[in-house]
Image (tube, rainbow, N blue to C red):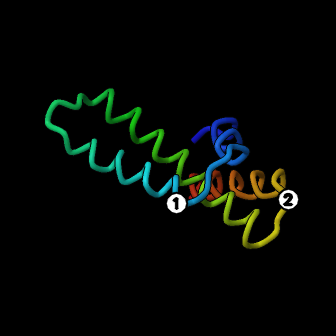
């Protein structure tokens, strides 16, 4: 996951439904027989960033957390889960 990518997605004119639909398309794409391992890695990275953006957007819109605080809290959760 890359914080600048997640921040860019959060600041865009998109909502959670847009991310959900994009994720469904990417999930379908990974089943294509002609997809190479390198392409799967890129698709996986895109999916991770989209899921991260959804989580941050939920904090901002539902929990009313300021954007910068929501982004920092998300990355702390990610790094915390990596350390375990």
Q: Is residue 8 left or right of residue 43?
A: right
- Tell me the element at label 1: helix
Q: Which residue is found at the position 14% from the left and 36% from the top?
A: 33
Give the percent coordinates (x, y) of residue 76.
71, 55
Q: Picture coordinates of residue 50 (x, y %)?
A: 53, 48
**Left or right: 48 as drawn, with respect to 79:** left
**What is the CA distance from the residue labelled 1 to the residue labelled 2?**
21 Å
Give the residue number, with chain letter if any, for mark 1: 17
Q: Residues within 10 Å of mark 2 (few under 14, many from 20)?
A: few
Q: Quadrant of the N terminus?
A: top right
Q: Residue at x 41, y 32 (%)?
A: 42
> Residue 66 lies in what quarter of the image?
bottom right
> Horizontal placement of 34 versus 66: left or right?
left
Q: Is 72 rendered above or below residue 44?
A: below
Give the SS element for disc 2: loop
| For marks 1 and 2 on the same chain, the one whose residue lies earlier in the sequence | 1
Residue at image point 57% right, 60% down: 16
- 25, 4: nearer the viewer: 25
Please provide percent x and percent y for residue 9.
64, 43
Residue at 73% across, 45% down: 11
The number of callouts visible is 2
Residue placed under numbered mark 2 in the picture: 66
Q: Which mark is residue 78?
A: none
Quarter containing the C terminus? bottom right
């Amino acid at each position: 996951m890359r914080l600048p990518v997640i921040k860019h997605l959060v600041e865009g004119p998109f909502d959670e439904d847009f991310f959900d639909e994009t994720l469904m398309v990417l999930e379908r794409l990974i089943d294509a027989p002609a997809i190479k391992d390198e392409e799967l890695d890129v698709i996986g990275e895109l999916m991770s960033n989209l899921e991260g953006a959804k989580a941050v957007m939920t904090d901002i819109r539902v929990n009313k957390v300021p954007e910068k605080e929501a982004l920092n809290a998300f990355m702390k959760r990610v790094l915390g889960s990596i350390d375990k």
